Amino acid sequence: MKSGMMKKQLIFLFTFITFSTLLFAGPKEAALGVLKRRIPQLKNRVTFVEMPQTSEKDIFETEARNGHLTVKGTTAVAMCRGMYEYLKESCNCLITWEGAQLSMPNVLPDQALRRVEASVPLRQHFNVVTFGYTTSFWSWERWEFEIDWMALHGINMPLAMTGQEKIWQKIWKESYGLTDHDLNDFFTGPAFLAWNRMGNIYGNQDQVLNMLGNSPSGQSLPQSFIDRDADMQRKILTREVELGMKPVIPGFSGFIPRALKTKYPSLNTWTPTPWNFACRSSLALHGLDPAFQEITNKYIDAYKAFYGDVSNYFLIDLFNEIDPPKTISQKDLANIAEEVYKSLSKKVPNATWVIQGWCFYYQRYWQNVQNTASFLSKVPNDKMIIIDLNADASEVFRLHPNSVAQKPVIWSLLNNNWGQRTRLHGDLNKIASKPIKALKDLGSHLVGMGNSSEGIENNSVCFELLYDNAWRNTEVNMNDWLRRYAEQRYGTKDPEAFRIWSKIYNLYYQSNEGDPTLPYQSSPSVKIAQQTSPQKEEKELIEMMLAAPQKIRSNKLYQRDLVDVVKSYVGNNIGTSIWKVVTSIQNNDRNSTKYREEFNRLMLGLDALLYTQEQHRLSKWIADARNYVDQENKNYLEKNARLILTTWVAPSWQGYARREWSGLVGDFYRNRWNRFFDALSQKGFEQSTFSKEIFEWSNAWCSNTALQPSAKCDPVRQSKELIKSIDQLYSNMPMVPIKK
C-alpha cells in the first residue's frame, strides 16, 4: 500500500517537474527548441549561455572551437540570432520562407570571439492586414515555423492579432447582454477580419460585402473558426513569450456592435465615413465617453484571463483610413488621445500604446501637421510607439518632425507589397541605407526596425537585408552583401551564383516604382491587349540560370528563383498573346482559334510551373482554409478564401490581392479571359455590360469547390518549354493594329 502510494507521489512529482520545466523554460531551453526544430543536425554541437541584460538592446557573443559553437545572448532571440549569423557567415547557410539551405561542413569552422549589439531595442514583424492576406488560415505547423524564423532573424516584437474575436464575443454577450444574432451583424468573414477590427468593414450584410454571406449555421463568423483561432493564439503567444518576445496584442479601438447602441442609447458614438466610399460604416464609441474606460477594463481582464498576462504593448488604431468627425476640434483630438491612453494605463500601469503611422501619411486630414501634433500632444512620449509602416517609400517622422518624430519610432518596411502581391520587386539600396540614416537622424527616438508588408512569403532577400540592418549601425556594402547572400542561398562559392543574383538584383531589386499588375491579372478589356516584345534582359537571365552548374540547379532555392523569374517573363509576354487574340477577333481573322489555343497553352503551362512550388498554389490556400473549421463550414471558408484573392469588396477592387498562383492562373484568370474573348466575338459587344457580367461571374466562381487541376512537371524542364513557347508567340505575329 505504501509502495503504491509512494509510486503515485513520484509520478506526480515527475509530472509536476516536467510540466514546470516546459512552462517555465528559460532562454537557453527556448533557443535550444528552435535549434532542434530547424537545425537538428547541430543539436549536440551548439551550447547556449545566458548573458545578463545590461542595456535595453540585445547582445550576443559567438565563438567556435574544435567543431563546437558557443552562443551567449541576453535573450533567447539574441541567442538564436547569434547562431543564425554564425551559420550564415561561416557555413553559407540560409533559412527563408520558401525553404532552407543548410548544407554545412561536417566540422563547424572555428570563429574567434565575436560580440554584436543590436542597433535598436525592438525588431518588429507583421502588418495588421497580414493577418488577412497571409496568415488567415495558417496551421500550427506553419505558425511554429514563422515564430522560429522570427527568432533566427532576431525579431522580438511581432504583432499578435489572432484570436481576439473570442474575447469580444465573450464581452459583448456576458457583460452587455448581446446575442449571437446581434454579433452576426458585426463580425466579417475570416479573411476580412483585419478590416473589421480597424472599423473599416462592418459585418457581412453590406450591399457591397453581401457576397460574403453567412455561414451555414447562420453566423457571419463560424463558431468553429472563433474557437480554433483562439486556440491558435494561445499557442502563438505561449511560444513567443517563451522565446522572450514582446508581442503586440490588440487593445480596444472603440469599434462596437450597432446592437450595443440600440441597447444603451446614451452611449456617445459617431459614424465614420464609409470605408473607400463603398462599405457600410462602422460604429465608433467616442474616446471621451466613460464607457471607453469600462470596456477597456473588461476587455483587458478577459484577455488576460484567457491568454495570460503576456504583454504590455497594445495596438490601438482609432483612425486608420478613417477621418474623425468634422465636429471634433484639434483640442478634442488631444483630449481623446489622452483619455484613450489613460483608459489603458489605469488598467495596465506600464502599458505602451502602439499605433500604426499609416494614417499620418495616407490621409489628407492627418497630413495637416497641426491635426497630428494635437492628437499626439497629451500622450507621454515614452508611452507610445509609432510604427512608420511605409518608411521605405515615405518616412512619416520626417513629414511630422515636431510630433511623430518626438515619439519612439519603428522604421518599418512595406516594400510596396499590397495584398501579398507576388511579383519580384524591392529596392535593396533603400533598405540598405534608409534605416541606418534614420538611426543617425533620430538617435534614441528610433527604437526599432521592422517589416509591415501587407503580405509575406515572397521577396525574401529584402527581409534578410532588413533584419541584418537591425544588428548593425553602418550601411552595408551592397555588392559584398549580395555576394554573400548568393553563396548562402545556393550553398556554393561558385562565381555563377553571384552572377545570377547580380542579374536578379539589377532587374528586380533596384526600384519599387510602378504598378506590378500583369496583363492576364487585369480585368479583361481591349485596353489591356498590347503588343510587346520579349524582355531581352529577362530572357538572358533565364538562359544564364538554365546553364548553371548542376550543383546550383539541384538547389531548391535556385529552383524557386527560376520559377519566379520565368513567371515574370511569361506573365509579361502573355499580354502579347492577348493582343493577338483580340486583333484576330476584331478583324475576323481565321487564325483566332489558333491564337486562343496558344493563349491557353501558355496559361496552363505557366500554371503547371507555378504548381511546382507549394507557396504558389491556390489549392494549398484553400485546403488550409477548409481545415480551419468544422465540416459544416468548410465550403463557407473556401468561398471566403477565394474572395479576398479575386473580387475583394467591389468591382474597382478586383485583383487587389492578385497573385501568380497555380489555380488562379489556370482556372480563374484563364477562364475569365476566355469569357471575354467569347463576348468580344459577339455582335454588339459593350465593355460596360461585360464588366458587370464578369464581376458577377467572378463572385460565382468564389462559390465553387473545384479547381482546374494543375499538371505536374519538373521546374527546369518546364521553364525551357515555356521559353520556347514565348519564342513561338512572336514568330507568327499578325500585322494589323488593334481597335481601341
Image (spheres, helix red, strand yellow):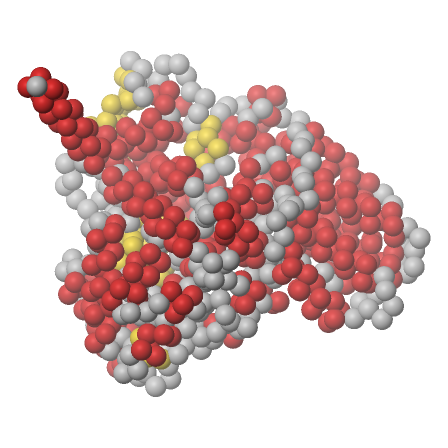
Q: Is residue 672 left or right of residue 163?
A: right
Q: Residue visible at 44% across and 77% down?
A: 273
Q: Residue visible at 53% across and 55% down?
A: 636
Q: Residue visible at 85% across and 71% down?
A: 684
Q: From where the camera sits, is residue 18 visible?
A: yes
The x, y position of residue 409, in whole percent, is 30, 58
Image quarter hosting the C terminus: bottom right
Q: How many numbered marks, from 0 up?
A: 0
Residue 22: name its quadrant: top left
The x, y position of residue 322, in whole percent, is 41, 72
Q: Residue visible at 63% across and 26% down?
A: 548
Q: From where the camera sits, is residue 512 visible?
A: no
Q: Is residue 683 above or below residue 230?
A: below
Q: In the depicted view, which residue is nearer to us: 339 or 280?
A: 280
Q: In the depicted view, which residue is nearer to us: 649 or 581?
A: 649
Name the residue furthest left.
2
